[in-house]
Image (tube, rainbow, N blue to C red):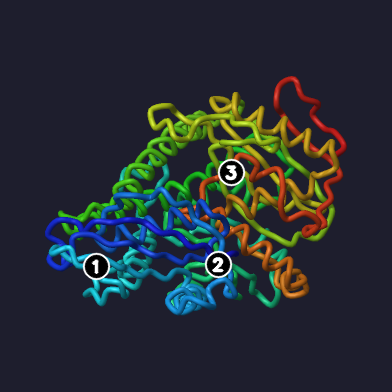
Amino acid sequence: MATFFVKFKVAAVPRSTQAELVEGAYALCWVVEASAAAAFNQAQFYITKDEWSITDDSEPAAEVTENACQDWDIGLENFRKAQEQGIALVYAGWSRDGKTIAEPMPLPKTRRFDLNDYIGKQKKLAGKGRCLHFDSDGRCKEIIKAHSIQRSGQLSAIADEGHVYAGSANIGDIKKNDGRITFERRGIGKMSTFAGFCKTHDNEVFAPIDKQPLFPTNEQTLLYAYRSLCREFFVKENALELADSQLANWPERHPFTLFEDLKTGTATALENLRRHKDDLEASLKRKSFEDIEYTLFVSRQKPILAFSGLIYPHFDFLGRQLQALEDLSTPLDLITFCSATMDEGWGYLFAWHKSSARSCREFMRSLATAIYEGRNGDALFRLVFSTCENLALAPVWWEKLEADKQVAICQRIDLMTSAFAPVETDYLTKGLEGISGWQFESVLTNVPGEAAETAA
């Protein structure tokens, strides 16, 4: 992570505290980020949150060092502050009588984002259980904390004394690390759970994958996909309610649009998830599983990760665009991926409904090309840490991993989860090479026109 400096010309938002004091100002920003673009976007975000409107952003973010700030007291002080807090902001402005204020302005603090309140609401919503089964109709009793990653299978296979490593949700850790990822040991009983099914439906629906290893069958692959999708559906429903709550409590005069944009994006994602959920449930209702397509990579190695996630394939493993996620009016193709225990070793399973075949088949073809070029383990490992937050790490592996490789993994997660860093077209083509040591002996698939089993 580098430190960037960016300057904006700003005006106070009408009826804000600053509007009573000044006509305009310069916002001087020092930001620790992965790229100049991410630093620029983050600076804009915090300036807007402080109730300023940007009138001139013609100067791009430029990387700076501590040595370069030595001769500028304000620069050195705020460079160091940014190292501790992630960002430092100073406003220097002029009053309405035209007299310039040369020094940093001692303005009253504006309304700040309350992280404690936000995390508290988020946790409360996560505990708000409901059964997502298609036959529930809101009547189900005994809602449970269902495991989206199998406790007795995948999690137990990588655990050390019943514990794995997972991203910390502790408010102290989040503040200490400025929102960046930090891993903590966690008992597998509390790992990857969500209150999205009643006990009866969870036991009935997922028995073919909870009580036996992956073979695979079409039914099993559909159920792995369905479980991944239901967890994401549960999370997105909560996120939409949380965004509504934040918007309801935000001052009307504020031009800050983060939660409006977040709500729009979340609502669109939820609409797409609901469509894919309906497609999978139609197969479950009929007990007919010919609509599911999958590709499974088989490894005899001891697993080091357990994960379950999904994406709308945007760019493939060759950096080509597959679909336009920014077009909110177009239904999006979706692919799920997860780890799964097998009789010997484990499997890395991709699955999708045939309605998503256009993008998903092309996505898998690009992966096949990457594998042919000798990058199969790296490419699959990169996908997990670039797109999946529902994952657990084997303590024995993580604790022995070299510090620079741990840092590289954490930086990849931070980059891909940053609200400010744009997704690069080549994010799946490079990064995290030589870390996993993964080897896959064979590939199984039911995709029409593809060989049912091949050597990886």
Rendered location of residue 5, percent (x, y): 48, 63
Picture quarter containing residue 10? bottom left
Quarter of the image for the C terminus: give it: top right
Local SS, label 2: loop
Q: Where residue 181 is drawn, which disc sits there?
A: 2
Residue visible at 56% across and 61% down in the picture: 63
Sequence-first disc among 1 and 3? 1
Residue visible at 38% across and 69% down in the picture: 89
Of 338 and 146, nearer the camera is 338
Q: Where residue 100 is drawn, which disc sits there?
A: 1
Camera sees residue 182? yes
Quote the CA–CA distance across marks 1 and 3. Answer: 41 Å
Of 441 and 373, nearer the camera is 373
Specify few, some or many for label 3: CA neighbours under 10 Å numbering under 14, 14-19, or 20 or more. Answer: few
Amino acid at pointer 3: Glu
Amino acid at pointer 2: Ile
Specify few, some or many for label 2: CA neighbours under 10 Å numbering under 14, 14-19, or 20 or more. Answer: many
Compared across the picture, whether 352 is left or right of 442 comes to: left
- Which residue has dot 3 on it? 424
Quote the CA–CA distance across marks 2 and 3. Answer: 20 Å
Q: Are marks 2 and 3 in contact (CB under 8 Å)?
A: no
Local SS, label 3: loop
